[in-house]
Every structure is written in structure tokens, then in C-alpha cells.
């Protein structure tokens, strides 16, 4: 286990021979107000801990220092974190009452005190990112009070969850006055964890390789111990025996002082036998049988409870206490503690025990801990070191430990426990399912493999259906939907033939049907099959959560197929009217797709805003990123470029920069399209170039979103042929997949305008005739207006003006404000060519006003140039100072204007406080205001219309 200890034992000798290393550390840690880390690595006994203690001693009095020494085995999930923060009272009976756990810091509670979740938190496993987010804000709060130093000794044994958080902290705390010291043993043979590499590779981290002492340092230590300088032969022999390991040099010096008090020993005194005696404590060869038994028990248990040590040693508590005192007198144990003075001693004790006997001790220790009602994770630490798990109670203990790890927000640790338990019975279906759930995010391939194996073992229909549902959810995250779709179809047949009519069976049947849709609509190859299966399915009423899930996915199917909007909108409205948008809410997302494409924006905005606020409160960065990306696409469709830019920037920052999910598509594409409208196509091109999902062309939604973004970026850069290439690919791909909705990815709308501009009207008319039936079937005023616009740009003379006039009429009061601005602009151009300058100016001013309201610099620049050519002029500016704000700046400014503090803004947007301060300074400069008190008025300044 990990425990809080002093890094230096009382009376420890001073640091010798480390002037260079200490100088490097001193120089590296000198920069104030910035994150600094130091990794000290070297073999056992080389003096890493003492060097760290010396560096800590130089930090001064106005610094808070928290230390932890990790013990072999790693400890329970977040055990090192709990040991670090234990002195602050954050792991006691009522940590939630601590003022240190206010705001987002409360999300750290599952790690600090898993039995005391914060009020209002959801039941079940904690979100691992949310826990680390909470620990970051706890640390940031401490650093705001005074500079903070965290020291982690023997980090190679740090539990995985704590180590991942330390890596997270190094990445996120660049602007905080925090120093992190870690020591690493290099001879353990185990590969360094990825999180440790992340720390070592950080620009803020200095790596110091602590080497054995040279001859001069060994001589200095011997001189100090003997009171006189020893002969060169003695120094050389001492260096040979100890290898320059400071710990052993000091032991040998102490032994020499005993055999030659007040005098200088000669080299003959350092015989091989004496060398062994000099490190006799290291070899533990002078202990009585009783002392040895207690020493072994203490080494195995690593506990501060002498009664447990006595029980494992097979002796009475009084005898055990005397033996522990003897071990302390011999220098093996720390003063006032049951912990070993150095891990070299502890390891020597264990090495002296035959492997079979050592395994027997660990098994007995596990049983003893279990019987004494120790935590399941403490029992599991012993069980994880056994070659086999021979008894059922051990499996139960590992499963309980896994549940505890999940509740702490450490699913990867839970997966390790359950993987170990599976070695007892590889065919235990419940274990296979539980381990797959724990591994779903960290190793989805292994998770799916375990579910596949479980499915070969289960024939009972309800159990099989539940496993298939779990498989579908896991497969979606692993981009393996075709197999999930195949299994989900099998589950539908099971439900139809082998389930009854009880409420539970009906709910299971409905959920299985819904997940067929979820899996089948993910990739293009299965969209048609989904449509055929559900063609005659009567939509459910939407009275239960399962029915709303199915109803929402049926709406998504109808939308992709391009059924009339009037048919699918009422059902979609029933899905969202309950307001139960939650994690994994595919039904709500499906209904949202239907509603916003049908121009019913308000209910979608309310639902996504609720999901965003919920995810921010819970610290769920992934959910927040997905919801922000979806809302950005909605705002783009609604013509609100300013808000789309804000949401898309947040989604990109969370998913790509913070969570580093390289397979994401939506955030990059939404941000790229917003930047095109803002007049920054080069940055937009950089963003779409970041899209790197393997097999992207398989996916039903993301692929066409990507092609639309890429086509629009190329058009904005002037590469019209390149734009047509991407747009036509989009149209062909939609047709191949059987996706018939004309506005899901309106490639035709952009392609026709490009073809008209290139003087290729026949190609444009072919495109119009290709999509006209689906546009009329969808039937929204926006879609019909877009169709008239396309016909208008292709038709010459009066016919074109009539079509564009009808387009402007249909689009004027629709949610398609960008398309409305486009129609007014094109109509104004056509009227000017027809000799109606006054009519042209009227239409172009309307276009300008709408483009200004939408925040589209792209449309605005085109319309302003056309108005100037038509002899018109702008009597008022068309540019608000707020247009200069970036997406991130807009997000922060809006929250600051609403009264949020810098810390509250940072917590809600998953930023650092320094980043918020930096952006606000930029906002004030761009808006020409003096500070926060003027911010609300500056943001509310209306756009000035063209006159």
C-alpha cells in the first residue's frame, strides 16, 4: 500500500557526492508560477530518495509539501492520491464538507472517499476523466493558496489510476505554481507505464539519472564515519563491495566504525566475509526464527496493524511486538513505524523465502485480510500476486475489488482484477461481461473478444439478448458496427420467438429493436437493411424510456430515408418532450437530427443545452464534446455562425486537444465550416486535414459531414473543381447507402451553384432533376426554397428571376437564414444584370442584413461588393466588434458576462484558470472595453443594419 512517511529517517547521514544533481534540480525548479517536474531514476539504494529530500529541503517555508512512498504491488485505485491528500483531512469521515472540495473539486470524491459520493451524483461507476478533472481543481485550489510540491517516491509501484492522474496534472497545470518530484527504480525489469512516459516526455520535466557514487564520495563517507581518512586500498575495496551504492556504503562505514573505533582499518579487514557481515542487515542472516517470521509477515502485509502481522506470523501479539522492536533496533524498520527502512531490506526478506512458501504466505495474508473485513482491494492486492486463484471466495473478492475500482473512476484497474479472476474460470459469463464493461474504453478489442466468448456459452434468450446489447454499445465505440448489427438482428429473432409479454420482456424486446437501429444506421452498408426490417414497424407511443429510445431511432431512420418531414416531426417531438436526455441517449440524438433538419430548432437547442450543462456539472468531457459538436452543427444549419463557432471550438478543444481522440470527425468539420463563413478557409483546411479515422468512408453520418466540409473549404479557397469532386462523391455515397434525405448533406445545393458559376448549366440541371423528388418529399419550406434557388441560378433571364424570387419568399421566414441571404444576394445580382438597379440594391441590402445577423463574413463580403457595383452604399457599419472574437473567446466572454468567476468558467469549459484570464484580456482588447463590468453591454450590442 501507499503511505505518507517522512522521506528521511531521523539521524540519516547527509547527502554526499550529489552537488551536480542538486544544482540541476535547483536550477530547473527556479521558475516561479509554472509547473515543474523532476524524475530521479536509478537502481535501488543509489540515493534517489535522499536526493529528492535534499531538493525538497530547499523549497523554503512558504510551500506546502505533500509526500507519498509507493510500495510494491501498486496499491488500490488512487491509493497514492489518497495518501498525498490525507494530511488535509480529505480522506476522513466527512471529506465532502471540506471547503477544498468546492466546485469541480467535488468530483474528486470517488478517488478520495469512494463511499461518500457528492450530493446529486449519479449512481454507478464514476467517470474516470471527471475524477481526474476534480483532482486537478483540488490541486489548483491548493496551489492558489501557496506553492505546492508533490513528492512521489518509488513511482514504479504507484497504482495505475494515481499515475495516470500525475500525467494528467503535468499536462494541465503548466501555469500553476506546482512542483512534482518522482523517483523511479530502474532495475525492476517491468516496462515503464505509458503515464510515466508522459511525465518524462513533458517539456516541464527534468530527468536526472542518479549514478553510483564515485571514489571521492565513498572516501568522504568513510572519513566522516571513521573520523580519519582511510587508506586508498580501503576505499577501493569498499567501492568494490558496495558498487558505489550510497545506502550500502553507509552501512559498511558504520560496521567499519564498530570494528575499528578511533582508528583506520586496513584493507585486510575488508575480507569477503566481513563484506557480507557489513551488509548483514541487507541479507537478513542474523534473525532468529521468530524474528524472521515476523519480518516476513511485515514484508507481505505492509500494514501498520501489529495484530495482523502477528496472525500471519503465527505468533502472539506480544511476541510479535517485541520482534518488531528488535527489527527496528537492527535498523530494518523505520523509527515509529512498521514499514521497512528501505525496500532493499524488505525485498531481501522476501527473497530469502522459497517461492512456494512465499505464495502460501500471500494466500494466507489474503484470507486473513478478508476475514478481518479489510477492503476488497487490499485483499485483491495479495491475490494479484498469486500464480493461481484456487478458491471461489477469491474470485468474489476480486469482483468486489473491481466494483470498488470502477466506483473510484478507475475502470482499467477493475479490468485487471477481473482478468485475474477469469483465470479461475475462463467460462464464467458474469465475469466475462463485467470485465468487458470495465475494458470497454481502454481495450475495446479485448472487451469484444470476451463478449464473443460469453455468447458462445449462453443459450438462455434473455441473458443472450442482454449480452448482445452490451456488445452493440461496446462495438460502436470500437467502430465495429457490422458485427453488432448481425448480433442485434439475432436478438430480435430471439425476442420474437422466445420472450413473453411481461413488462420486463416487452422492455427488453423494445430495447433490442432500438439497438438494431443504432447499430444499423452507423455504417452505410447496413442502412438499407435497417430500412427493410422496419419498413412496416408501427412506431411506439413513447411512454417508457425504452419506447422513446426506439421511437427516436425510428425517427432517425425516417429522416435518413427522406420520408416527409411532416410524418416524422410529431414523433420526434414526443421523444424530446419528456426532457430525459441522458448519457447514451441515442433516441434523443435521433429525434434531434429529425427536428433540426426539419427546422424545428428550439426543442433541439433546449435538449442539447440541458445535456451540456449536465455533462459540465459532472465533469464528463467526452459527453460535453459530443453535445457541443452536435449543437454546433445545429447552429450552422440555423444560420447562427457566431454560436456555432463557439460550440465547435469547445468541442474541438475537448475532443481533439484535451482528450486526444484522433478518430473524431464532427468537431473538426463543424469548426471548419464555421471558419469558412468567418472568412478563414486556410485554417479550415488545416482542421479537415486533421480528420484521421480509419475507414471513414464506411460511416453513414460522419463521412458525408466530412465530404461536405471538405467541399466547402475547397470552394472557399477557390478550388472549384476540387470542391465539385468532394460534393459529387458525397452525392454518390449517399445514393449507394440508400440515404435519401436531401438536406442531411446538401451536396447538390453547393454543386449546382458552382456549376452555374463555371458555365455548365446542363450538368447543374441534371443534378437538380436527380434530387428534386426527394426535396419535394421532405417538403420543408427551406428545402423547397433551396431547390428554387438552384433552378434560378441555372435558368436565364426572367425565368431565373422568377425562380430566385420564389426561393427568397420561401426562405425569408424559414430557419434557413444563410440560404435566405444567399437567395437575396443571387436575386440582387440577377436584377442588376437585368437593368433593375433599384430592385438589386433592395435585395442586396436584405442579404447584407441577414448575413450580418448570421455572422457570415463570407456572404457579407460577397453582398457588399455586389451592392457597391449596383451603385449602393452602406450608411452604417456592418461589423460588430464581437465579430473579431474567436470561438473560445466568445464562450468565455458569455459566461463572464453572466457573472461567472474565472475559476467557474475554467471548470465549466475544462480549461485552466490562466487560459481564461488570457482569453478575457484578449476579449477586452478586441471590444475596446476596460473590464468585466462593460462586457455584457458590449456583447449585447446589436448588429447595425445596412441602409
Image (tube, rainbow, N blue to C red):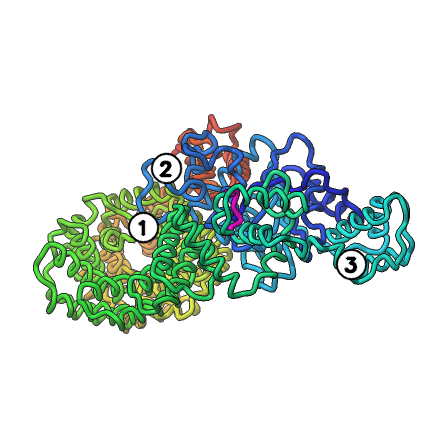
Query: Residue at (21%, 58%) from the top-left corner?
Result: 553
572 relative to 301 in the view: left or right: left
Q: Find out whether the residues at labels 1 and 2 contact each other: C-beta distance under 8 Å.
A: no
The mark lying in front, picked from 3 and 2, is 3
Q: Residue 153 or 752: which is nearer the viewer?
A: 153
22 relative to 780 in the view: left or right: right
Q: Find out whether the residues at labels 3 and 1 contact each other: C-beta distance under 8 Å.
A: no
Q: Find out whether the residues at labels 3 and 2 contact each other: C-beta distance under 8 Å.
A: no
Q: Along the polypeptide, which appears first: circle 1 or circle 2?
A: 2
Please provide the residue range marked out in magenta: 301-306
Q: Residue 378 or 916: which is nearer the viewer?
A: 378
State the mark number for residue 634. Answer: 1
Query: Residue at label 2?
Result: 118
The mark lying in front, picked from 3 and 1, is 3
Q: Distance between the residues labelled 3 and 1?
A: 77 Å
Magenta segment's dominant SS is loop
How far across and how far down the image is residue 103, in percent?
Answer: 43, 34
Question: Which image quarter is the C terminus in?
Answer: top left
Q: Residue 847 or 436: which is nearer the viewer?
A: 436
Query: Residue at (52%, 46%) from the top-left corner?
Result: 303
State the mark number for residue 275. Answer: 3
Q: Along the polypeptide, which appears first: circle 3 or circle 2?
A: 2
Q: Residues within 10 Å of mark 3 (few under 14, many from 20)?
A: some
How far across and how far down the image is residue 703, in percent?
Answer: 36, 65
Disc 1 on helix, strand or loop? helix
Disc 2 on helix, strand or loop? loop
Disc 3 on helix, strand or loop? helix
Q: Which residue lies furthest to the top in this view?
A: 933
Q: Distance between the residues labelled 3 and 2?
A: 58 Å
Amino acid at each position: 500500500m501507499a503511505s505518507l512517511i517522512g522521506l528521511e529517517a531521523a539521524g540519516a547521514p547527509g547527502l554526499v557526492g550529489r552537488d551536480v544533481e542538486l544544482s540541476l534540480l535547483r536550477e530547473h525548479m527556479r521558475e516561479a508560477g509554472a509547473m515543474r517536474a523532476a524524475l530521479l531514476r536509478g537502481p535501488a539504494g543509489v540515493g534517489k530518495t535522499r536526493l529528492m529530500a535534499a531538493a525538497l529541503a530547499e523549497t523554503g517555508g512558504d510551500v506546502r509539501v505533500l509526500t507519498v512512498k509507493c510500495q510494491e504491488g501498486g496499491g488500490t485505485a488512487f491509493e497514492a492520491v489518497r495518501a498525498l491528500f490525507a494530511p488535509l483531512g480529505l480522506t476522513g469521515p466527512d471529506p465532502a464538507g471540506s471547503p477544498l472540495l468546492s466546485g469541480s473539486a467535488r468530483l474528486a470524491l470517488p478517488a478520495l472517499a469512494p463511499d461518500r459520493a457528492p450530493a446529486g451524483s449519479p449512481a454507478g461507476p464514476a467517470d474516470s476523466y471527471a475524477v481526474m478533472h476534480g483532482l486537478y481543481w483540488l490541486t489548483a485550489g491548493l496551489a492558489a493558496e501557496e506553492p505546492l510540491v508533490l513528492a512521489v517516491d518509488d513511482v514504479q509501484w504507484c497504482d495505475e489510476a494515481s499515475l495516470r492522474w500525475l500525467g494528467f496534472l503535468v499536462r494541465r497545470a503548466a501555469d500553476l505554481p506546482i512542483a512534482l518530484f518522482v523517483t523511479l527504480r530502474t532495475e525492476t525489469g517491468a516496462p515503464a507505464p505509458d503515464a510515466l512516459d508522459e511525465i518524462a516526455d513533458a517539456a516541464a520535466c527534468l530527468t536526472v539519472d542518479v549514478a553510483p557514487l564515485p571514489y571521492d564520495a565513498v572516501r568522504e563517507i568513510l572519513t566522516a564515519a571513521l573520523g580519519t581518512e582511510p587508506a586508498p586500498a580501503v576505499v577501493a575495496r569498499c567501492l568494490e563491495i558496495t558498487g558505489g551504492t550510497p545506502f550500502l556504503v553507509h552501512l559498511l562505514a558504520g560496521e567499519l566504525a564498530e570494528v575499528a573505533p578511533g582508528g583506520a582499518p586496513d584493507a585486510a579487514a575488508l575480507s569477503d566475509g566481513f563484506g557480507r557481515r557489513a551488509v548483514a542487515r541487507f541479507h537478513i542472516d542474523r534473525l532468529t526464527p521468530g524474528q524472521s517470521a515476523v519480518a516476513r509477515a511485515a514484508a507481505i502485509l505492509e500494514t501498520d496493524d501489529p495484530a495482523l502481522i502477528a496472525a500471519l506470523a503465527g505468533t502472539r501479539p506480544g511476541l510479535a511486538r517485541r520482534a518488531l522492536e528488535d527489527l527496528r533496533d537492527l535498523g530494518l524498520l523505520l523509527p515509529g513505524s512498521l514499514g521497512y527502512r528501505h525496500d532493499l531490506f524488505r525485498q531481501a526478506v522476501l527473497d530469502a523465502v522459497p517461492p512456494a512458501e512465499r505464495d502460501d504466505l500471500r494466500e494466507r495474508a489474503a484470507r486473513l485480510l478478508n476475514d478481518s473485513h479489510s477492503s476488497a482491494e487490499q485483499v485483491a492486492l495479495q491475490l494479484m500476486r498469486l500464480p493461481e486463484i484456487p478458491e471461489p471466495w477469491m474470485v468474489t473478492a476480486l469482483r468486489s475489488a473491481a466494483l470498488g475500482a470502477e466506483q473510484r473512476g478507475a475502470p482499467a484497474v477493475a479490468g485487471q482484477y477481473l482478468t485475474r479472476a477469469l483465470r479461475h474460470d475462463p467460462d464464467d459469463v458474469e465475469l466475462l461481461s463485467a470485465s468487458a464493461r470495465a475494458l470497454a474504453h481502454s481495450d475495446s478489442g479485448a472487451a469484444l473478444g470476451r463478449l464473443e466468448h460469453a455468447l458462445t456459452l449462453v443459450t438462455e434468450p434473455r441473458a443472450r439478448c442482454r449480452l448482445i446489447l452490451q456488445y452493440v454499445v461496446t462495438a460502436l465505440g470500437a467502430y465495429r458496427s457490422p458485427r453488432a448489427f448481425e448480433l442485434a438482428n439475432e436478438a430480435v429473432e430471439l425476442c420474437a420467438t422466445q420472450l413473453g409479454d411481461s413488462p420486463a420482456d416487452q422492455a427488453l424486446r423494445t430495447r433490442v429493436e432500438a439497438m438494431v437501429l443504432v447499430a444499423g444506421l452507423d455504417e452505410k452498408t447496413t442502412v438499407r437493411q435497417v430500412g427493410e426490417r422496419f419498413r412496416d414497424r408501427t412506431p411506439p407511443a413513447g411512454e417508457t424510456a425504452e419506447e422513446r429510445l426506439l421511437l427516436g431511432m425510428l425517427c432517425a431512420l425516417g429522416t435518413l430515408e427522406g420520408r416527409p418531414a411532416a410524418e416524422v416531426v410529431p414523433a420526434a417531438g414526443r421523444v424530446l418532450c419528456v426532457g430525459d436526455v441522458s448519457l447514451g441517449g441515442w433516441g434523443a440524438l435521433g429525434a434531434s437530427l429529425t427536428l433540426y433538419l426539419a427546422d424545428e430548432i428550439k426543442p433541439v437547442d433546449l435538449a442539447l443545452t440541458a445535456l451540456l450543462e449536465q455533462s459540465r456539472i459532472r465533469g464528463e468531457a467526452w459527453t460535453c464534446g459530443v453535445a457541443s459538436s452536435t449543437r454546433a452543427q445545429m447552429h450552422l444549419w440555423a444560420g447562427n455562425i457566431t454560436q456555432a463557432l463557439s460550440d465547435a471550438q469547445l468541442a474541438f478543444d475537448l475532443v481533439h486537444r484535451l482528450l486526444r481522440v484522433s478518430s473524431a470527425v464532427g468537431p473538426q468539420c463543424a469548426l471548419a465550416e464555421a471558419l469558412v463563413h468567418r472568412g478563414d478557409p486556410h485554417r479550415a483546411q488545416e482542421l479537415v486535414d486533421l480528420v484521421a479515422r480509419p475507414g471513414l468512408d464506411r460511416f453513414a453520418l460522419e463521412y458525408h459531414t466530412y465530404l461536405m466540409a471538405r467541399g466547402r473549404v475547397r470552394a472557399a479557397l477557390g478550388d472549384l473543381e476540387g470542391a465539385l469532386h468532394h460534393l459529387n462523391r458525397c452525392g454518390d455515397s449517399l445514393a449507394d447507402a440508400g440515404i435519401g434525405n436531401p438536406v442531411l448533406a446538401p451536396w447538390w445545393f453547393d454543386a449546382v451553384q458552382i456549376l452555374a458559376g463555371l458555365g455548365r448549366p446542363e450538368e447543374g440541371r441534371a443534378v437538380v432533376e436527380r434530387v428534386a423528388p426527394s426535396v419535394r418529399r421532405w417538403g420543408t419550406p427551406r428545402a423547397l426554397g433551396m431547390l428554387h434557388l438552384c433552378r434560378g441560378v441555372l435558368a436565364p433571364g426572367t425565368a431565373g428571376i422568377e425562380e430566385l424570387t420564389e426561393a427568397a419568399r420561401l426562405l425569408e421566414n424559414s430557419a434557413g437564414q444563410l440560404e435566405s441571404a444567399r437567395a437575396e444576394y443571387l436575386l440582387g445580382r440577377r436584377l442588376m444584370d437585368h437593368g433593375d438597379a433599384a430592385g438589386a440594391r433592395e435585395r442586396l441590402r436584405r442579404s447584407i442584413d441577414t448575413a450580418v445577423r448570421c455572422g457570415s463574413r463570407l456572404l457579407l463580403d460577397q453582398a457588399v461588393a455586389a451592392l457597391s457595383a449596383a451603385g449602393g452604399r452602406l450608411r452604417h457599419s456592418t461589423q460588430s466588434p464581437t465579430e473579431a472574437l474567436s470561438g473560445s473567446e466568445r464562450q468565455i466572454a458569455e459566461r463572464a458576462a453572466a457573472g461567472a468567476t474565472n475559476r467557474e468558467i475554467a471548470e465549466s469549459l475544462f480549461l485552466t484558470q490562466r487560459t481564461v484570464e488570457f482569453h478575457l484580456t484578449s476579449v477586452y482588447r478586441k471590444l475596446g472595453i476596460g473590464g468585466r463590468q462593460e462586457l455584457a453591454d458590449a456583447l449585447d450590442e446589436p448588429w447595425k443594419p445596412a441602409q
